[in-house]
Amino acid sequence: MQFERSEDPACFDTFAAEWNALLAESITRVPFLTPEYLRTWWAHRGGGEWPEARLALITARDEAGRLVGIAPLFSAVNRDSRPALLLLGSIEISDYLDLVVRPEHAEAFVAGLLEHLAGDPGWEVLDLYNLQASSPTRAALARAAAERGWGASEQVLEQTPAIPLPTDFETYLANQVEKKERQEIRRKVRRAENGEQTVTWRLVGPTDDVNLQTDSFLELMALNPDKARFLTPPMRAQFRDTVRAMSARGLLHLAFLDVDGEPAAGYLSFDDGKRLYVYNSAIDPRFNALSAGWVLLAYLIQWSITNGRTVFDFLRGHEDYKFRFGGVAGRILRLQVTRAGALTGDPIPSLNPDEAPVFPPEAAQ
């Protein structure tokens, strides 16, 4: 494999078609790894999370010049105050991250990547956040690091609840939701549909003004004090451009529940045709008595089942409602590779990289 490093953001566009083709067959296939998403993330540095950073995107090609692997990295001082290489998208607003490589090339690509990085003196730790437990990158990096005499360690970061979806909504309710919660979901939906107020839900479509609908969603988000603090001007700009990019890529799934024509709740998700990734939510507290968030969530799960989605992914976070709706806990991890001779600092607890994941690997794609 021939490795090359790029610090020019034009690379996101230069080989976007090759990137997307590789991603479609990669060990991890998620919207957060598309060049469209990561180009936007880099333009805003994650909504201002990494103001001091340099792009370090590394590609590998075979002898015929075909793209076989991408390590979408950037260099910065990490949260442990160490010179590091991190995955683009780290840390806060991209739930699943990984290398982009086909399964059959993963071991060779990872070994070649470490060999390539060994010649770069500007980093101490390869600090990879938000790897899924099912990712082959974990074991491949642990083995490649051990072969070089480098250190490798892991820690669990967060749970990632997801609902494996059956073929019909009633089966889902009957088999995957506890009786009390099942009754509660049905009661809340029935109350919304039969009440005095007109309750409807809608998806933002290709003929809608995406910018206008995005601003509507952000204003709905800002009604929550914690989310209002999160939505700094740089983060709002990040959200707006991300939604536009994902809409242009055909991955946007933005839904609203309207009460008497007024937005009461919203869910911003990404949809790859197999899995719905629930990225963020927004609820107007004036409609708490109507349980607008629960009602819209029930509609979205039913929509996902009807339209052939196999997984409803809540992404990271262990909020109670995710499990009340039948979420099964997966997890994401932080993996660190420390080069020989680097100061180790406080060690991260080691985990067995070959242990079975909590969530089935086939459902993680």
Image: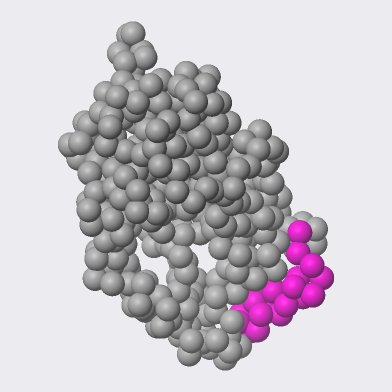
In this view of the protein, can residue 255 be seen by the observer? yes
29 and 134: which one is in front? 134
Q: Is residue 132 above or below residue 185?
A: above
In this view of the protein, can residue 252 be seen by the observer? no
Could you tell me which quadrant the N terminus lies in?
Answer: top left
For the point 55% across and 31% down, which residue is it? 142
Magenta span of residues: 176-194
| Residue 241 horizontal/vertical position (percent) | 26, 57
For the point 66% across and 33% down, which residue is it? 354
305 and 79: which one is in front? 79
**Quadrant of the rendered image containing residue 256:** bottom left
Q: Is residue 169 left or right of residue 210?
A: right
The magenta stretch spans residue 266:
no
Q: Is residue 109 above or below residue 362?
A: above
| Residue 177 horizontal/vertical position (percent) | 76, 64
**Quadrant of the rendered image containing residue 101:** top left
Q: Is residue 235 left or right of residue 250?
A: left
For the point 48% across and 86% down, which residue is it? 285
275 and 22: which one is in front? 22
Q: Is residue 204 above or below residue 354?
A: below
Q: Is residue 311 above or below residue 183?
A: above
Residue, far top:
63
Predominant secondary structure in magenta?
Answer: helix
Q: Is residue 89 left or right of residue 185?
A: left
Could you tell me which quadrant the C terminus lies in?
Answer: top right
The magenta stretch spans residue 181:
yes
For the point 24% across and 41% down, which residue is it? 55
Q: Is residue 269 left or right of residue 155?
A: left
